[in-house]
Image (cartoon, rainbow, N blue to C red):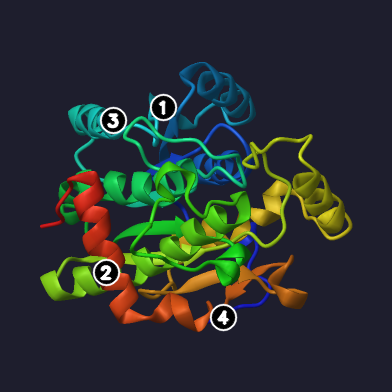
Amino acid sequence: MNKRNWTLKDVPDLTGKTIIVTGANTGLGYESVKVFAQNGANVVMACRSVEKGETARKQLVRLFPSSIIQVMHLDLADLQSIHNFAATFRESHAHLDVLLNNAAVKMVPYSQTKDGFESQMGINHLGHFALTGVLLDVLKKSPKSRVVNVSSLSHKQGTLDFGNLTFENGKDFTPMKAYGRSKLANLLFTYELQRFFDSKGIDCMAVAAHPGISKTNNSNGDESNLLMKVYKLSVSYIIQQANMGAMPEIRASVDPDVQPGNYYGPGGVLELSGHPVLVQPKRAALDVESAYKLWEASERLTAITYK
């Protein structure tokens, strides 16, 4: 059901649910954690900075004293950190109901992750691909679990180049090109992940969401860069607050009516703002061959094989 005014009143009781949120200490992630915790979930805030995560957790506990929130270190730019996170998570959690792959960097200058990937592809896509893969065993043990990948309207400008997927040595790199590619990859991964679940008979579903144009702290770009200044000025008059921008990913995570492969975004004009509704990606995001090739490349680059 594509309810057009889905609000926080529609969030069900989440008592007993375990939810991981990446990039949880600020922006969309923080707003999502707030809603999940308020409704009884056991929330794991996966943060690159444990200090900032703890500051955010304390703010939330003051708001909701009975909430169950844990901060764990996760650096999506470091495959070893991803493996360490999964191992630590398993020590204290037997199941995982929702993995919300929310963290992102946006339109940053060229740089590389610890493993040598261009940062936006490395963090936004490959990091979450790896995280999902190393948590797959826990997801399998959790009936009706979900993986929610947060994409962007910028996926519509994204293109893939399998000969130079991660802009090796900065070749053909621009901040916008890399960001759009990473957000297109998020959607291709979502649909291929659902096909993987279906083929293996796994009781888990892959879902996607995008926030429209929202006030977040994930830009991390050079604020003095002319392109970034023009971008921020161009969207300033239509930008919505982070609590509304988080609504599509919140709905994708907890709405009982969500179906495998659903994609949620704001229901307003051009999907820029508004209440979360079902939306459609660009056609290239549905290309099965591209999704399969991306999956193969992602397994090779991360050395993580889904089984």
Marks 3,2: beta carbons within 8 A = no
- Return the x and y of residue 17 as percentages of the image width and height: 35, 47
The residue labelled by disc 2 is: 293
Quick one: label 1, few (<14), some, or many (20+) residues within 10 Å?
some
| Rendering quarter of residue 216 | top right
The residue labelled by disc 4 is: 2
Q: What is the three-letter code of the residue carrying label 4?
A: Asn
- Return the x and y of residue 265 as percentages of the image width and height: 60, 68
Q: What is the three-letter code of the residue carrying label 1?
A: Gln
The residue labelled by disc 3 is: 85
* Whole-number angstrom distance, CA of label 1 to CA of label 3: 13 Å
174 on left or right of 199: right
| Residue 41 visible in the picture | no
Q: What quarter of the picture does the C terminus occupy? A: bottom left
The residue labelled by disc 1 is: 70
Relative to 306, say whether 259 is above or below. Answer: below
**259 or 207, which is in the foreground?**
207
* Whole-number angstrom distance, CA of label 4 to CA of label 2: 32 Å
User: Farthest top residue?
Assistant: 51
Of the numbered discs in the image, which one, if any, rests on residue 209?
Answer: none
| Residue 80 visible in the picture | yes
* Whole-number angstrom distance, CA of label 3 to CA of label 2: 27 Å
Relative to 54, say whether 131 is above or below. Answer: below
Query: Viewer-nearest of labels 3 and 2?
Result: 2
Relative to 19, say whether 159 is above or below. Answer: below
| Rendering quarter of residue 164 | bottom left
Q: Earlier in the sequence, mark 1 or mark 3?
A: 1
Q: Earlier in the sequence, mark 1 or mark 2?
A: 1
Q: What is the three-letter code of the residue carrying label 2?
A: Lys
Q: Earlier in the sequence, mark 3 or mark 4?
A: 4
